[in-house]
Image (tube, rainbow, N blue to C red):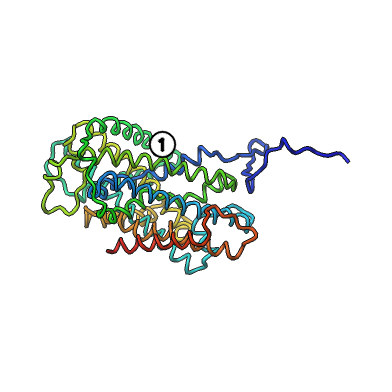
Amino acid sequence: MKTIDNSDVPETTRLFSNLSFEKNRLIHKSGSVVGSTLLIAGTTVGAGILALPTVTLPSGVLPSTALLIGVWLYTVVSALLIAEVSLNGMRYNGRASNGLLAMVESSLGTIGTRIAGGAYLFLHYALLIAYVSQGGEILISAVEKIWDLHYVPAWIGSTGFALIFGSILYLGKDRFVERLNSFFVAIVIASFIGLLLLGATQIHPTSLLSQDWSALPPALSVMLVALFFHNIIPVVATQLEGDAAKVRQSIVVGSAIPLVMFVLWNAVILGSVTPAMLQNISGDSSIFDPLQILRAGDAGQWLGILITVFSEFAIATSFIGFFYGLRDLFQDMNLFADTPNVSLPLISLILFPPMGFSAINPNIFFTALDYAGTFSVSILGGIIPAVIAWKQRDKYKELNQSLVPGGKLVLVVMIGIAMIAIILGNW
């Protein structure tokens, strides 16, 4: 008998192959680790970064950086749990995962699905409210500067922002919106690099040394929102053909890139805030937003312009992403099963609530982000992944592949931290 030498054949770790027919040929489209890494990084870098300086200013650069790293570690572990659940679901069902809510339904049943669906719906609406509110405020500030206007009602800004981008999403073809979003992302990257380089020249060393560790808890919920990317983990697992090593690498590296950006951004913005700026805080203002002061040009006109451009386009890209996320959720719920992707009733259901809340309370940006992180992210990115992983490890011991070491103790810790975040959010 002839012996076949397989020593030169690379070991295959993927669970399936992404195949498609092109020109009567069967093409294998293997997932790209680089592409999946950038997808995670791009999803993570959103408008949540704009709220960071406000919630981290009371504690200072060093304490907030330490908490950012801690929150990042938590989100990485929870993302790996979702990846574990997704990959194990592929093994059990023999097909690629259908998404986070589909995994919840198959593992936790109707009650779990309703809880997760409610958290998912609340997250999207809360963030859309935040984006419309802040996007409108920045838009109005720019208009007032350009045309030298003294006062424009805040509701005009939020309504205008929602109508402008809502019209684009309603009238524009998918390919046009995709190209427009890519253009916006390029602007975000260019303006971010520019403001880091320029902002580094405006840093005051004394501002970097300020510390108050007791002021950290209020920043937790916003950091959870800023580092949330868990809804696309099933997509990454499918793109990478269920290869656990590639999925793990994409999650760790893809989330580490935004972490570095957030740390640098936080240091530059807080370092640019001088004691004189803090003394000029209005006595009737409950929230001090450093970006609002810097956009006004208090630390230099060009820095103010770059922060304005970065802020508005970061919000625009996040708005587009969560608009489509909410659209897909309503279509999955069969509310608009027989209508076009962006019909007038559908877009009205998506846009009118954020427009209404923003018009009633123009300062709702930070409140909306706080509630989103306190409830939705804690449930979707903390409690539910740990509970599903727990059930899978008990029920399918022979097929289960754990991506997170530490056994059930780690799962208990993850659930405990999520509960602490919810408690702190209601303190």
The residue indicated by pointer 1 is: 182
Please report the residue visible at 43 percent of the width from the left and 56 percent of the height from the top.
381
Q: Horizontal placement of 201 versus 409: left or right?
A: left
Q: Horizontal placement of 274 versus 349: left or right?
A: left
Q: Is residue 42 above or below residue 76?
A: above
Tell me which corner region of the image, top left, top right, bottom left or bottom right, holds residue 294.
top left
Locate the C terminus and report the quarter of the image it occupies. Answer: bottom left
Image coordinates for residue 251, horizontal then vertical, percent = 48, 45
Image coordinates for residue 403, horizontal then vertical, percent = 54, 52
Tell me which corner region of the image, top left, top right, bottom left or bottom right, holds residue 165.
top left
Image coordinates for residue 221, horizontal then vertical, percent = 33, 55
- Is residue 57 among the parts visible in the rendering? yes
| Front residue of this view, candidates 174 and 364 | 364
Please report the residue visible at 35 percent of the width from the left and 56 percent of the height from the top.
373
Locate the N terminus and report the quarter of the image it occupies. Answer: top right
Image coordinates for residue 101, horizontal then vertical, percent = 49, 59
| Front residue of this view, candidates 302 and 281 | 281
Please report the residue visible at 22 percent of the width from the left and 53 percent of the height from the top.
363
Q: Secondary structure at mark 1?
A: helix
User: Which three-letter amino acid code belongs to the residue tagged 1?
Assistant: Ser
How crowded is the residue under tag 1: few (<14 C-alpha within 10 Å), some, or many (20+)? Answer: few
Please report the residue visible at 37 percent of the width from the left and 55 percent of the height from the top.
124
- Is residue 159 among the parts visible in the rendering? no
